[in-house]
Amino acid sequence: MGRTLRVEADGGSRGNPGVAGYGALVRDEAGTVLVELAAPIGTASNNVAEYRGMLAGLEAAHRISADAEVVVAMDSQLVVEQMAGRWKVKHPDMRALAQQGRDLVARIVDAGGSVDFVWVPRADNSAADALSNRGMDGDEVEDWHADEQERDDLAPSRDGEQEPARPWSGRGTPTRVVLVRHGVTAFTEQGRLDGRGGSDPDLTDAGRRQAQRAAELVAGLVGDDPVQVVTSDLARARQTGAVIAEQLGTATEVDRDWDEQSFGDWDGAAVRDLVKDAAEDFRALRDDRGYARPGGESHDEMVERVLGAWERVVARGGTVVVASHRKPILAVLGLVLGLPHESMWRIAGSPGSLTGIEAWPDGQAVVAFTNRT
């Protein structure tokens, strides 16, 4: 066993969902603070912010001592009970964050350590609460309280200068992921729903031009780096990915979990007709995460498979290009940015556009750009 460490974590949202941030600190067995962390996370719920605080604190504890005996203390009964395995994790956003937490716990346990989660009253979590408020105020805090040698070990130099290692940087090199929305089809041009269970149309001439432009943009981004190209199983994504792969001199792999949502009996239906004749159901398809058309799937069902595909891409390492669809790309951005369902629609995603993300195996990620055409 390594050191005995105590993680105190919290998160908050002014609006729930609203302006959100997290805070965390790690103490040693004597109660001495070893590190303080805080950061804003954009618009998110209280629960997401609390999970993010827990993840930041647990990652810091692992960095201090990989085989530590860790106690995670929080005033969020939800996070504590879910991470302890006593409550089920039903919300997709929470499932992804809880899995990141379980992965961190496994890394500590595999190294010979242990992790226990305990609930504490809010009054006993004031230090983490104060840090989370700084995060909500927009402050980024990363203060390692350690002797000089420990700071050197925890924060390797960059260009000859000592800089604290960022809690989202994980260990090692991030996977560079470029998400590419396919070019247009006749259905796109006609304003029709086009899911994974419909007619599966090919790219139009305009769509092929968009795919070629996307390929040129990708080539400019990756340079001479080796690149892996993954596509959904739908024709428009496979064709877009094939153009990119040819430009890069590589092959494509198909992963069906990157497919667009299945719209069931509405696949191929014109949006203008649905808005006119089935307005209430159409709003439910957009706004209700659990709503599914007969023979189709809900948003949450789509998200669950897409996030599994996302985790597999991140695990590949290197540079990966994924040719996919609007909703799967939004699902990934929603996870990375902690966005509530109603907010992700505010992100533009043009046909043939590129979205760049750097992602680490511990679940942390940074969005470099979106909707680049």
Image: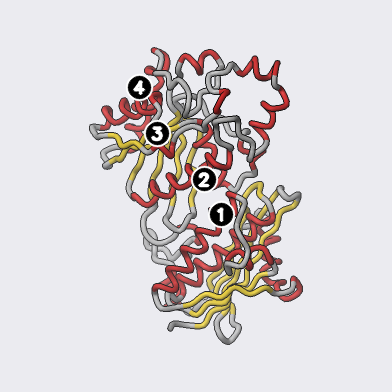
Contact between labelled residues 2 and 1, with CB atoms less than 8 Å apart: yes
Which numbered disc flags the more N-terminal residue, 4 or 2? 4
Three-letter residue code for mark 1? Arg
Nearer the observer: mark 3 or 4; the answer is: 3
Whether residues under marks 4 and 1 lie with C-beta atoms below 8 angstroms apart, the answer is no
Q: Earlier in the sequence, mark 3 or mark 4?
A: 4
Residue at point 57%, 23% (across, down): 266
Q: Quadrant of residue 77?
A: bottom right
Q: Is residue 107 above or below residue 114?
A: above
Task: Give the residue displayed 44% in from the left and 45% down from the top.
Answer: 310
> Mark 3 to mark 1: distance in Å?
23 Å
Q: Please state which amino acid type lies under the numbered disc 4.
A: Gln
Q: CA distance from mark 4 to mark 2?
A: 31 Å
The residue carrying pointer 1 sits among few (fewer than 14), some (14 to 19) or many (20 or more) residues within 10 Å by Cα, namely some
Q: CA distance from mark 3 to mark 2?
A: 15 Å
Mark 4 vs mark 1: in front: 1
Report the disc number at residue 245.
none
